[in-house]
Amino acid sequence: MDTTAMIERALAQALEQARGSEAPPILNQALRYAVFPGGARIRPRLCLVVARACEPEPPPLAAAAAAAIELLHCASLVHDDLPCFDDAAVRRGRPSVHRAYGERIAVLVGDALIVLALQTLACARPAARLSRTLGIIGRAVAGPCGIVAGQAWECESEIDLASYQRAKTGALFAAAAAAGACAAGADDAGWFTLGERLGEAYQIADDIRDVLGDSGDIGKPTGRDRVLGRPNAVHRLGLQSAIERLEVLVAASLDAVPDCIGAAELKTHIRAEAHRLLPRALARPAA
Amino acid sequence: MDTTAMIERALAQALEQARGSEAPPILNQALRYAVFPGGARIRPRLCLVVARACEPEPPPLAAAAAAAIELLHCASLVHDDLPCFDDAAVRRGRPSVHRAYGERIAVLVGDALIVLALQTLACARPAARLSRTLGIIGRAVAGPCGIVAGQAWECESEIDLASYQRAKTGALFAAAAAAGACAAGADDAGWFTLGERLGEAYQIADDIRDVLGDSGDIGKPTGRDRVLGRPNAVHRLGLQSAIERLEVLVAASLDAVPDCIGAAELKTHIRAEAHRLLPRALARPAA
């Protein structure tokens, strides 16, 4: 089964945990709406390709970890879009969850996705790697440098910009790489750096697309960072330097791939993903 | 160590997972505020007394499961109090989290507590019981009859009242009993019924206190169910019948205690908790 199919199947299985004849129908519709159809699934793809780089036939825990990472990402998008945060009307090219289903359902969807993410790990084998994998993923969300802390920096009067960006984007990328390695039975310690660098690269690519992309291309309105007063690498460095920084980070990511049986394929994947992130936006300069 | 001290220590340990010099200070303050000082800690007490009834010296996973259950309960209170749900200004006798720290921090506190709850299970021994314990607790939150589904019934035009009440209160009580048994190495299957009956009894006691109690006594305003249009057993059955129903449920809970080494002490605990819930409110009839 190819990577995309494996991720979509694992996501569907995770959502099945919430379904049943006794379940409230609107919540279940909204859970599916928040997860399908997805975005680029870049984090779960990273998780699975790392798992395969460590072990060509990784166990079911690898796909479960990939699904968990993506569900946590989806949960963070649903809650970040709420009126009290970004008040985003559009996500992935259609109404955000709170616009489509109301604010109460959007809060509950985020809550349920967080639990379904971690719960889906519990069912996957080998159980002996569950504790460590759960710890890696849990810290990436609720640890001092996790994505919740990243979002909470927006509520502080003085922002530690490095902590903010590392936490808000880097944490889940780092966990995706480390959890993939851990699920596949490898030593996860060497894999965080790769994820952090890719996360930073992705953040810069996202900043570039926020400035240059058109909204049909990326599924959400552009220019939001300026409207919301959020840091953006293009505003800070200028476009050319932001692109150069992105190239440096992609090279650093390639350097950070630990020794493993599938290192060559993994590097090919990283180059392809980096290529996919950038040129489309750059081919359409700001009108 | 007594039950209360063990629960408070396990809760503090769970919150430690979010602390660190790089963490945003307001979020960390608000996390503590949402958990300490607590309410009656009735769910984690149930979890631990069941664990001890199965195994006099239960392993660390039992205290971790108790803390997880309480953190999930705290998360649900923080999110249920939000303006889009109950818009509650007061909780446990002081401003609710969103009134004290703002709505954005309240959303993030709930999210972090959910993750910290499940993450704290990952650190506790024996790891061999983690998968099953995590599954029990996860289903109680995000399953078709879990507390998120219970809350989501409030967003449906037609409510299935039995599903609503079983999910909104019963699910976490049932999981508290079953997770306690599971963490202690017992067969958990027989323990859900006890928790469900206690949950229903607690819901009726809460309904009675909503009608009869004064707000200083229970730490939140009374008469909220009528204001919010929520079902209340006293409105539905009348006070005397509600009290009789409560007594029937406590007796049914005692009957539902499975064979175990500490059954007698457990029944004593259940009688004491039931006594604690009711008379104080009944000693103060409606003015």
Image (tube, coloured by chain):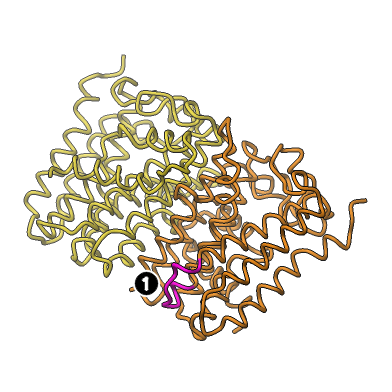
Chain colours: A orange, B yellow
- Tell me if I can see residue B157 in this picture: no
Total numbered labels placed on residues in the image: 1
Front position in the image: B168 or A270: A270
Left or right relative to B249: residue A271: right
Element marked by disc 1:
helix
The answer to if A273 sits in the magenta stretch is no
Q: Position of residue A103 (x, y in %)?
A: 61, 42
The residue tagged 1 is A129
Q: Position of residue A48 (x, y in %)?
A: 55, 74
Instruction: Count neighbours of disc 1 (C-alpha within 10 A) and say few if under 14, some if 14 to 19, many if 20 or more.
Output: some
- Toward which corner of the image does residue A104 lie, by quadrant? top right
Inspect the image, locate mark 1, and give the three-letter code of the amino acid beneath it.
Answer: Arg
Seen at 35% across and 28% down, the residue is B92
Q: In the picture, which quadrant includes the N terminus of chain B?
A: top left
The answer to if A188 sits in the magenta stretch is yes
Q: Vertical placement of A169 versus A157: above or below?
A: below
- Magenta span of residues: A181-191
Seen at 48% across and 33% down, the residue is B26
Q: Vertical placement of A3 versus B161: above or below?
A: below
Front position in the image: A130 or B72: A130
Left or right relative to B177: residue A29: right
Q: Position of residue B172 (x, y in %)?
A: 34, 50
Left or right relative to A246: residue A44: left
Q: Position of residue A145 (x, y in %)?
A: 49, 49
Q: Vertical placement of B16 versus B57: above or below?
A: above
Seen at 67% across and 41% down, the residue is A86
- Toward which corner of the image does residue A254 lie, by quadrant? bottom right
- Tell me if I can see residue A17 in this picture: yes
On what subunit does the disc labeled 1 rest?
A
Instruction: From the image, give the main secondary structure of the stretch colored magenta.
Output: helix
